[in-house]
Amino acid sequence: MALQSLDIVRRSATTTPEPGVRQPAVGPVAKLIDTTKCIGCKACQVACMEWNDLRDEIGTNVGVYDNPPDLTDASWTVMRFAEYENPKGDLEWLIRKDGCMHCADPGCLKACPAPGAIVQYSNGIVDFHEENCIGCGYCIAGCPFDIPRISKRDKKAYKCTLCSDRVAVGLEPACIKACPTGALVFGTKEDMQQHAAERVADLKSRGFEQAGLYDPPGVGGTHVMYVLHHADQPQLYAGLAPDPHISALVGLWKGASKPWALALMGLTALAGFFHFVRIGRNRIEDRDEAAAQQALEAARRSAPPGSGGTREKRP
Amino acid sequence: MTNHWVDIKNADIVLIMGGNAAEAHPCGFKWVTEAKAHNKARLIVVDPRFTRSASVADLYVPIRTGTDIAFLGGVISYLLSEDKIQHEYVRNYTDLSFIVREDFAFADGLYSGYNPAKRSYDKSTWDYEYGPDGYVKADPALAHPRCVYQLMKTHYARYTPEMVERVCGTPKEKFLKVCEMIGSTATPTRAMTIMYALGWTQHSVGSQMIRCGAMMQLLLGNIGVAGGGMNALRGHSNIQGLTDLGLMSNLLPGYITLPGEKEQDYEKYVAARAFKPLRPNQLSYWQNFNKFYVSLMKAWWGDAATRENNWAYDYLPKLDKGYDMLQTFELMSQGKMNGFICQGFNPLAAAPNKAKMTGGLAKLKFLVIMDPLATETSEFWRNYGEHNDVDPSKIQTEIFRLPTSCFAEEDGALVNSGRWLQWHWKGAEPPGEARTDLEIMGELFTRLRALYKSGGGAFPDPIVNLYWPYAVAKSPSPEELAKEYSGRALKDVTDPKNPTQVIRKAGEQLAGFGELRDDGSTLSGCWLYCGAWGPNGNLMARRDNSDPTGIGQTLNWAYSWPANRRVMYNRASCDPSGKPFNPDRKLIAWNGTAWTGADVPDYKADEDPSLGMGPFIMNAEGVARFFGRGNLAEGPFPEHYEPFETPLARNPLSPAQEQTLSNPAARVFKDDRAAFGKVAEFPHVATTYRLTEHFHYWTKHVRLNAILQPEQFVEIGEGLAKELGIASGDRVKVSSNRGFIKAVAVVTKRLRTLPADGKPVHTVGIPIHWGFTGLAKPGFLANTLTPVVGDGNSQTPEFKSFLVKVEKV
């Protein structure tokens, strides 16, 4: 148990059953990021650095307002600024706070091979426990939002914790506390959905017909959600994934194929063992080699002319 | 602010123009989001740049920098011609019906009385016509050709939507959309607030821009009402306190003006400021001027200020001219100044034309810096490569650096933009050798006084007689000073209606400026603050945020000057009979015997409204002025003039004259005029500004802020970038006629090329925050580029509009 008030319901590379006695009485939590109220002040970035004792490099300006220009091991959230000229010819400056989305179905956790390096709490927060991290980077491949970053210093993966330590004791995440305009709000997921619905109604009255809530079903919904002016085009917001899914590779590896693959591996080993016990070691005799050569020649002769490969036959 | 931060939530329309509240005031900006969320407010942003404020606006409209009067004049013209004005308000509460002198004139961009050699006006014709009774003549029908209404209509008829487009570059249909939205607040139940800041003040016509905005608000009936007002967003946390306490070279505390050198006579000095009413039964509150003056002099000189010596009138300096920042550095560059005490000020970065500043500072014998940080000014003599390329061997100025505490390391009051004096408590001890400013000033003064006492001098009286009653002379406490500026009775103060009735005993703190007397029986260091530390203690320390009416009137939170009033001119929120124009946002109302409500009435508390006293009690007329009389240097109605460095050759509104291209009444020193650049050599328009990530030149010393904006950049539009082959992230050189800076280019759609009188003009955006000291990447002071010319009234430098040339490095 990480903290008395945080039950771990999923743990990477672990099959022990989840604790089931306690249920979060008010349901899972969520952070709502209202991009339509956000002024890009970066107070959330500062609050994140201060609460989590992070200090990124003093970098350079690469020609944009975004600074640091990308997420790093020490910048768990960054503002992304996108200029968009709408069909009416008016400019919009879409500002999105980027960071971990805390997926209900977390690709990072699924992909992680290190037991207990990634956990999901019953309140919905997905947390990295770096002491168990082996630095393989599979969580990055598993993340549909490209969030985790491997530190150059300790070769471990880092990302937003949704201030699990604060939430565990009944506080809001640090970024929420710092936000001056109320663009960041925090509460139960249900309350946040309701608040978002009110915001969407207001935005529609201001001419944003496609305003909506971003809570992508492809990852089972998220515990960080966005209110977007253009919910039909999330990609406008510095490339927010329109329909995120966990990479098929992770699905195949850790999903449907895993029991079959494990069974197949077991069977193969078993078959090998019995073969060895019953027949002994496989040997290639000289006559076996000659027979194979003959068979090959016969096959070549019987094939129609020009069919050296199969390429030419294709349309 | 006429209103206050929380009140912005009551607005129906928020106009951000001449400011960028989301960028520079993100915490105050929350009240705009409240207005949008709970009051269905619409936000309009008019700015040369598509700003952070614009990113959450309902309507953004571009404007060429420095042309706000043309824009606002256009709106006034629209409101008058479309009849989008609040009639009951303007007829009763403004000077629209007043008749102006026959010899007042305006032609080709100049008002009557102009003296081109002096670049100033004889303002005697800028006045009303008076009847034999001494009162202003008026025509309530507004038909007289010389009534203010008719004059104003004629004046702004030239500001057509086409003219606005031609001067400002604002597309006509966008401009008209703004007019329509603004015009919607002419009804008594809708209000618009204007939020402005340095985008209006830092122009050579800054005061007139603000006046023009105020006139627009008056036409709409938006002054004095909840959700309305003219709201100046102050930059430093206590810059409001600075002006209130008279830290301007021409002011004493409480906006009392210093005498000029022609005002050697005390009686005349007072008479010129204690305005007699210009209309029947008007309060004309400045009639109490002498009470404020005497109480101030008692606070400063105690027993040495007597009736016999005109309350120490001779101790006050009599100005031969203004000694504003620009004048000071002009004198310094002329070598007329030996020493300079620089307290909480980084002029090398904050005053225009760094080269001039460096030259001036190098002529000083000594320079004292009182600051928590190692500022650029304190290092002006050190070579920092191309960022500060000076030769230290040629600079003989001796520098004393006195480290001070910062605001969080001392107790005291800060005055916010909404005029609230909020007491704060020390959060930490100052580090190392740092001392509070009070300790430093206290010790400096006591040592100087000892020198004057022993050595005498030409006129030591004001120094040796200074009232210094503090428990520890070398270190007056913030509490002692707060009690002093608030004020107390020196003798028993009696009720003027009943002299036997003592209302305040000797030694007791006063409850408000109504208790001040001109007989030497009271003391108050700043009459506007009187009552902040009253008989019931320190009201600035109150933290009760209860808001009984729900419109944000938290009268028991801190203390708001004047008289704990939250919305100034709130009498104007009611109709002439005393009923609120908007019952849903009632500030005060007449209940038959008194004015009561959610605010402290800005009016005589028991004045029956039928008696006709106007709501603008500080004006001798009792009403608000569209016709500014002689208050400002440029004329009674704001007129558009181009910035001193402009891409235009002639002013489109007064093309006949060369001298009306730029403000004809602005003061320009000879060398500074010679340093102006011309458009042929410097074809791009530059504007300087601040970013959310930094605070002036302070936070580049702070690691967290340096991480958020590490390196100096300039913003250029896609049009200019294409023309010069510049891509985002390239390094560029930006030069003016005064120097150059180099920075990273941020290429953006947010700065567009606008037509100026038909010619396309590119605007270059220059954030100011970098310099050669601190933790962020070293950079150039933006003031390397800026021109030395100030607003014609306040002398605030023209940092928002000047000419540069951009090149790829």
Image (cartoon, rainbow, N blue to C red):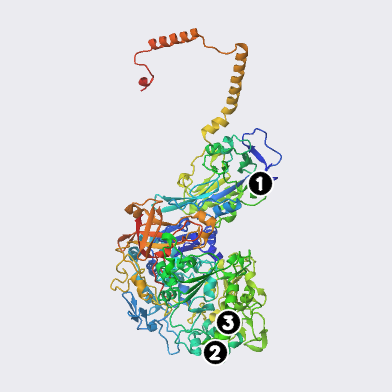
Find residue B14 and report its horizontal and vertical position in percent: 48, 63
Disc with the residue nearer the chain's start (2 vs 3): 2
Q: Which mark is residue A26?
A: 1
Say above or below: B99 vs B60: below
User: How far is mark 2 from mark 3, CA to CA?
Assistant: 23 Å
Q: Which mark is residue B310?
A: 2
Say above or below: B110 vs A150: below
**Chain under numbered label 2:** B
Considering depth in this image, is A78 or B552 the residue closer to the camera? A78
Q: Does residue A28 appear in this view?
A: yes
User: How far is mark 3 from mark 1, CA to CA?
Assistant: 69 Å
User: How far is mark 2 from mark 1, CA to CA?
Assistant: 73 Å
Find residue B296 and report its horizontal and vertical position in percent: 57, 82
Find residue A8 and report its horizontal and vertical position in percent: 66, 40
Considering depth in this image, is B587 or A94 the residue closer to the camera? A94
Q: Quadrant of residue A148?
A: top right
Q: Amino acid at mark 3?
A: Arg
